[in-house]
């Protein structure tokens, strides 16, 4: 479903509950939680002062994670041309997030599958969150790329 605030096509897992959005002047963060609250699917849309690389946006993400959770450790990262953007795994004081990060102009998006570090990972829930993350499409669709015959009939 299209989420105007996030400017993203989001795919919340069926039966997961929406958490209260977190909004500042620089970002909006929406999360959907599994029934037990141990696993999350989330999308963060953030503003950039200027167009920057994914690496610089990742640095800002980790800085904010460190501020809010007390720590931020980057465990893994690599560029994926299919996003295009970075895939990374990071641990904060409370959460471990498996994230797709993309930037376009003055905006960026982090789409993640997260788990609570102090709780056992529920593999089925994590796979559900990862599937939602992979189906999420940040940014407005390129309407001009749709052939005329593919439009409404």
Image: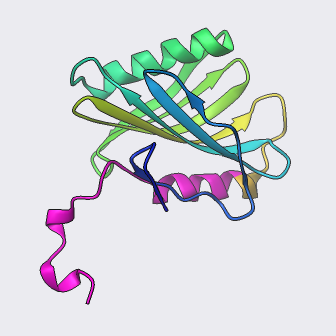
15 sits to left or right of 9 = right
Q: Would residue 9 be found to the left or right of residue 38 on screen?
A: left
Q: Which residue occupies 84% across, 35% down?
A: 119
Residue 119 sits above or below residue 56 on the image: below
* Residue at the (55%, 34%) spot, across then down: 29
The image quarter containing residue 67 is top right
Q: Residue at x 63, y 14 (%)?
A: 68
Q: Is residue 83 magenta?
A: no
Q: Is residue 142 magenta?
A: yes
In the image, residue 149 lies at what x, y percent?
Answer: 16, 86
Which residue: 54% across, 59% down? 11
Is residue 18 left or right of 37 when viewed as pictured? left
Nearer-the-camera pick, 48 or 111:
48
Q: Which image quarter: residue 5? A: top left
Bounds of the magenta span? Answer: 126-153
Q: Kindly indicate the quadrant of the structure image that contains residue 108.
A: top left
Residue 94 placed where, x, y %?
A: 73, 23
């Amino acid at each position: 479903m299209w989420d105007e605030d996030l400017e993203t096509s989001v795919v919340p897992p069926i039966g997961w509950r929406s958490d209260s959005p977190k909004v500042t002047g620089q970002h909006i963060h929406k999360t959907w939680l599994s029934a037990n609250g141990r696993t999350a699917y989330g999308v963060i849309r953030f503003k950039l002062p200027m167009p920057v690389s994914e690496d610089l946006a990742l640095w800002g993400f980790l800085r904010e994670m460190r501020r809010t959770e007390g720590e931020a450790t980057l465990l893994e990262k690599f560029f994926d041309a299919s996003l295009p953007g970075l895939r990374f795994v990071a641990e904060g004081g409370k959460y471990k997030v498996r994230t797709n990060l993309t930037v376009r102009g003055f905006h960026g998006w982090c789409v993640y599958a997260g788990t609570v570090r102090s709780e056992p990972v529920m593999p089925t829930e994590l796979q559900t969150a990862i599937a939602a993350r992979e189906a999420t499409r940040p940014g407005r669709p390129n309407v001009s790329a749709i052939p005329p015959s593919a439009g409404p009939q």
